[in-house]
Amino acid sequence: MNRLWSLLLLLLLASAQSSAIASSTSTAYKAAQKKAAAQYASDKKLCADESTSSARMQCLRDAKAEYTKALAAAKEAKSGAASCADCGRVIEVVAGTKKGEGGALGMIGGGIAGALLGHQVGGGTGKDVATIAGAAGGAYAGNKVEEKLRSSKFWSVKVRLESGEERAFEFDHDPGFASGDLVKVSGNSLSRR
């Protein structure tokens, strides 16, 4: 009989705790809604000060987008969907150029061209020295030209996951992400949330 009362008491406590958590989540959601609405009203007042109608309209669209984003974040927090291990936010996007590697083709081609040009200079022993110097200089120049031709662009996207971990992803084309975008990690790539 004592076990039955203990079990019943535990169930009542668990129910009360669950109700309190739901109530605090609901209160937090309502507070977030209220804050978003206040910010939206403030933004709309600022938009009225814009000098042209197109600027006012763009300002209003931006304000509405921010309001919608704030409501979505509040709903996400309310539903508990925010605990996504593979979700995060873009914190930096950097475009750069990878240095290419020169190879035998550039060296050989440059060396032959340099030797032919060097052979046109001087006479006797000087001609031989010029040919060798031309071949060496041409090989170096050919290697550098090949490095330049094989260089490629890349985009590095740095993401901070909800766990706090930071990861970087590299793309050989513009991925279209900007700082602040919400993303989800899929293997070694990213997709929008």
Image (cartoon, grey):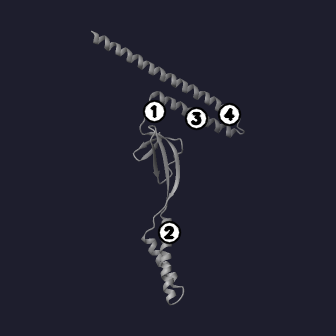
Residue under label 3, please give it.
66
Between marks 4 and 1, how big is the CA–CA gap? 31 Å
Circles 4 and 2: CB atoms closer than 8 Å:
no
Label ID, residue 46: 4
Give the image location of residue 61, x and y in percent. 61, 36
| Distance (Cα) linking label 2 and label 1 | 50 Å
Disc 3 residue type (three-letter): Glu
Q: Which residue is drawn at 35% across and 16% down?
A: 11
Quadrant where the N terminus sits is: top left
Label total for image: 4
Q: Which of marks 3 and 4 is nearer the N terminus?
A: 4
Q: Which of marks 2 and 1 is nearer the N terminus?
A: 1
* For residue 32, above or below residue 59: above
Residue 156 in picture, x, y percent from top left = 49, 50
Foreground residue, 104 or 124?
A: 124
Q: Mark 1 points at which residue?
A: 82
Instruction: Indicate the amino acid at tag 1.
Output: Ala
SS type, badge 2: helix
Check disc 4 and report its element: helix, strand or loop: helix
Q: Considering only order in the chain, which callout, 3 or 2, is on the residue closer to the N terminus?
A: 3
Distance, label 2 to label 3, CA atoms, is: 50 Å
CA neighbours of label 4 inside 10 A, class few (<14), some (14 to 19), many (20+): some
The residue under the point 47% across, 52% down is 171
Q: Which numbered mark, 4 or 1, is in the foreground of this view?
A: 1
Residue 1 versus residue 153: which sits nearer the camera? 1
Q: Give the residue displayed 38% in from the left and 16% down from the top.
A: 13
The answer for how far apart the CA atoms under marks 3 and 4 are is: 14 Å
